[in-house]
Image: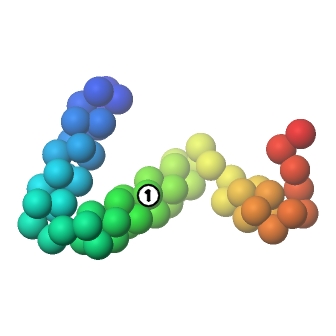
């Protein structure tokens, strides 16, 4: 699936949720979508969660 189609799908989902559930429903849906994206990237092996957690906790820097 191309990035354009993925972006269109995400935008459509967020628009429908925004209309149906309001602002807080939109934020909750966006949060769950972000968590799903991070877990999906991790499952594919394209994201090292331990490295991300180390960087967030200050044990490692990006430079």
Q: Which residue is mark 1?
A: 34
Q: Is residue 37 above or below residue 63?
A: below
Q: How is the image coloured?
A: rainbow
Viewer-proximal residue, 22 or 4? Answer: 22
Q: Position of residue 25 (x, y in %)?
A: 25, 71
Q: Position of residue 53 (x, y in %)?
A: 73, 64
Q: Residue furthest front?
A: 23
Q: For the residue labelled by badge 1, is the local secondary structure a helix, a strand or a loop?
A: helix
Q: Name the residue: 15% across, 71% down.
A: 21
Quadrant of the snapshot with the N terminus:
top left
Q: Position of residue 5 (x, y in %)?
A: 24, 31
Viewer-proximal residue, 46 or 31? Answer: 31
**Residue 34, quarter of the rendered image:** bottom left
The answer, for residue 50, to whether it is visible in the render is no
**Residue 4, quarter of the rendered image:** top left
Q: Residues within 10 Å of mark 1 (few under 14, many from 20)?
A: few
Position of residue 41 in the picture relative to residue 5 (left or right)? right
Viewer-proximal residue, 48 or 23? Answer: 23
């Amino acid at each position: 699936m191309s990035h354009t189609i993925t972006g269109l799908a995400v935008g459509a989902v967020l628009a429908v949720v925004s209309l149906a559930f309001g602002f807080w429903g939109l934020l909750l849906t966006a949060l769950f979508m972000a968590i799903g994206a991070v877990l999906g990237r991790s499952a594919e092996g394209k994201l090292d969660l331990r490295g991300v957690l180390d960087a967030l906790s200050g044990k490692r820097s990006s430079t």
